[in-house]
Amino acid sequence: MKFLIINGPNLNMLGIREPEIYGRETYDDLRRMAAEGCGKLGVEVDFFQSNHEGALVDAIQQAYFDRVDGIILNPGAYTHTSVALLDAVKAVGIPTVEVHISDVRQREDFRQVSYVRAACVKTIMGRGLAGYVEAAAYLKALLDGADPQQ
């Protein structure tokens, strides 16, 4: 089983950007934690990060051709603006979990809207970097035919 973790704009600045919201852990820490978590689940994982919307769309589409089983997507600010990402997730039909490090429900009004959520099997927010591992466990259970809520 293979997952792709896709991170949008400014996620490469973890540990630097607004540490009071996103914490002091870095993007390398995120990759390490997610890789270890996926490894424990017996899942292969690749990572992609871009600050460019089209590159994120390309990564989602390429996941289809690479036969990726699940996507963990943190679209960053594109969560609230990108119909293109929504359409890409819908087009590939790969089970996708939307992840946000912070709890966007507790933030600015504009962050209450998520375009991609409509195409995702689950949204995890406010769990910090651990949300990525939680998303991987959810996807693994879902794809194994188990109850992912357990």
Image: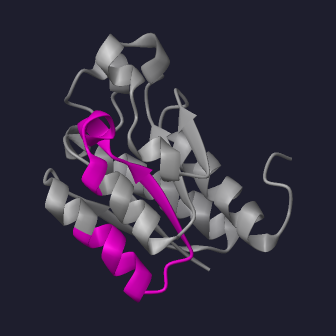
Give how far across and how far down residue 3 sits, in percent: 51, 70
The residue at 13%/54% (across/down) is: 52
**Residue depicted at 22% across the width and 46% down the height:** 12
Q: How is the image coloured?
A: one colour
Near-viewer residue (56 or 47)? 56
Q: Image quadrant of residue 36?
A: bottom right
Q: Where is residue 110 drawn, in percent x and y?
A: 30, 19
Residue 60 counted in the magenta span: yes
Q: Is residue 3 above or below residue 124?
A: below
> What is the number of callouts on the image?
0
Q: Is residue 69 left or right of residue 50?
A: right
Quadrant of the rendering where the N terminus is positioned: bottom right
| Residue 68 seen from this side | yes
At a point 61% along the width and 46% down the height, the residue shown is: 122
The part of the image, by quadrant, that contains residue 109 is: top left
Q: In the rendered view, does 135 fall on the left or right side of 30?
A: right
Q: Nearer the viewer, residue 65 or 14?
A: 65
- Asked whether residue 67 is drawn in magenta, I would say yes
Q: Is residue 12 above or below residue 23?
A: below
Q: Position of residue 130 (x, y in %)?
A: 55, 41
Residue 7 visible: no
Q: What span is colored magenta in the figure? A: 58-84
Q: Could you tell whether 144 is left or right of 1 in the image? A: right
Residue 9 in the image: state x and y as whole percent: 20, 44
